[in-house]
Image: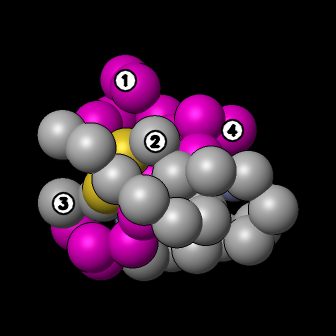
């Protein structure tokens, strides 16, 4: 999957993954590989 644009969480780093739960594109810092979701969804806060 190739993404363009910035992480929709921090809006500072390039997005590397998109969350299947909320659809946000997020950078590596905000991607939880274990949960396969963004940091927000992985923390259970959507
Ligand atoms: Zn980010
Ligand atoms: Zn999410």
Q: Please, what secondary structure does the residue beneath circle 1 have? A: loop
Q: Earlier in the sequence, mark 4 or mark 1?
A: 4
Name the mark nearer the viewer: 1 or 2. Answer: 2
Q: Earlier in the sequence, mark 1 or mark 2?
A: 2
Q: Residue at x 39, y 72 (%)?
A: 24
Q: Residue at x 62, y 50 (%)?
A: 14
Q: Please, what secondary structure does the residue beneath circle 2 have? A: loop
Mark 4 and ligand 1: say if the CB distance to the nearest ligand atom is below 8 Å.
Answer: yes
Q: In the rendering, at what x and y percent does residue 41 appear? A: 42, 62
Q: Is residue 37 visible?
A: no
Q: Earlier in the sequence, mark 4 or mark 3?
A: 3
Q: Which mark is residue 29?
A: 4
Q: Please, what secondary structure does the residue beneath circle 3 have? A: loop
**Residue 7 is covered by the magenta coloring:** no
Determine whether, in the image, residue 11 is placed left or right of residue 37: right
Query: Which residue position is annotated with label 2?
Result: 16
Read off the magenta span: 21-43
Name the mark nearer the viewer: 2 or 4. Answer: 2
Query: Which residue position is annotated with label 1?
Result: 34
Q: Which mark is residue 20?
A: 3
**Residue 26 is covered by the magenta coloring:** yes
Marks 2/4: CA distance?
A: 9 Å
Q: Residue at x 42, y 59 (%)?
A: 4
Q: Which mark is residue 8?
A: none
Q: Earlier in the sequence, mark 2 or mark 4?
A: 2
């Amino acid at each position: 999957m190739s993404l363009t644009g910035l992480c929709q969480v921090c809006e500072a780093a390039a997005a590397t993954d998109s969350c299947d739960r909320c659809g946000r594109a997020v950078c590596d810092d905000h991607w939880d590989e274990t949960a396969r979701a963004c940091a927000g969804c992985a923390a259970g806060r959507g």
